[in-house]
Amino acid sequence: MSFFARKIIVVKAAVCLGLLLILTNAFAQGTNALKPWPADPATGIPAPWKAQYHPDIPAHTQFKLLKQGNQTVLQAEADSAYGTLVYAFSKSMELKTLAWQWQILTQPSNANLQTKAGDDAGAKVCAFVQIDEARLGLGTRLALAAARTLSGERLPAATLCYVWGLPGEKVGQLFDNPYTDRVKNIVIRDAASAAELISETRDLQADARKAFGNELPEGPVMFTGFALGADSDNTKSKAKALFGSVQAQP
């Protein structure tokens, strides 16, 4: 084989390898339905991530990006405050898994997610589940419509939140939010403290069916968005958490 023939083969192989790497990288990036935190925290929280608050709670949870080692993380800090950072999809999506990192730095004093007085979370990760709203009772539908009008937001009809448990609560325990059965909490950690970011991976399809099975339409479960948060308005205390990488995959 001539020198020029060998050179052509090497060039073609390099081009093919380069294309393969580009396609592989594009595919890896495309598998995450959520926009990741930027490498430079100074660029700010990227759209469509958006902070949302309750109209009747004046103090707001503060969200900002920080550098922790080589990683950008989101800090959520609440001082007798409430707020969530929401990622709303333009259209519903079928998703199979949710993976993220989190760490509670400050747990609200006397928090108890099963009571109204203690309904504060040092950290929570929530998925908005698309349900068949026609299966809801008339009273629930009217209350939901009123809440959407009051907030000016297209509030989800079904929300599943992953939370840290209290002593005595078991991992896997599922219970209603004390204010509304439109929000379900599922305990996935049995202690509200951590020395470093902890990684989680959840089967969204299985968890959504466990929480809202009788309200789901036929076919795969669809999701309309996600939210991250920390709040301390009910306990009039403080909460602080970090969130690392958050990935939702089809």
Image: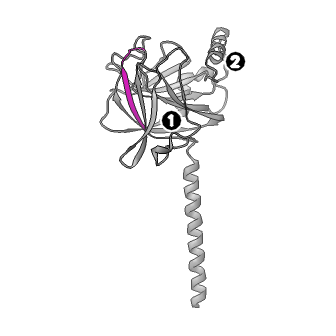
Q: Which residue is mark 2?
A: 134
Task: Please state, as top left, top right, bottom left or bottom right, where the N terminus lies in the image.
Answer: bottom right
Chief SS of the magenta region: strand
Outermost residue toward the left?
A: 195
Q: Secondary structure at mark 2?
A: helix
Dot 1: few (<14), some (14–19), or many (≥20) neighbours within 10 Å? Answer: few
Q: Residue 146: horizontal and vertical position, in percent?
A: 65, 13
Please state the extent of the stretch shown in magenta in the rendering: 234-243
| Residue at x 63% of width, y 11% of height | 143
SS for dot 1: strand
Mark 2 vs 1, N-terminal side: 2
Image-quadrant location for residue 141: top right
| Mark 2: amino acid | Ala
Q: Residues within 10 Å of mark 2 (few under 14, many from 20)?
A: few
**Residue that numbered label 1 is attached to:** 203
Residue at position x 59%, y 80% in the image? 9
Q: Position of residue 130 (x, y in %)?
A: 63, 27
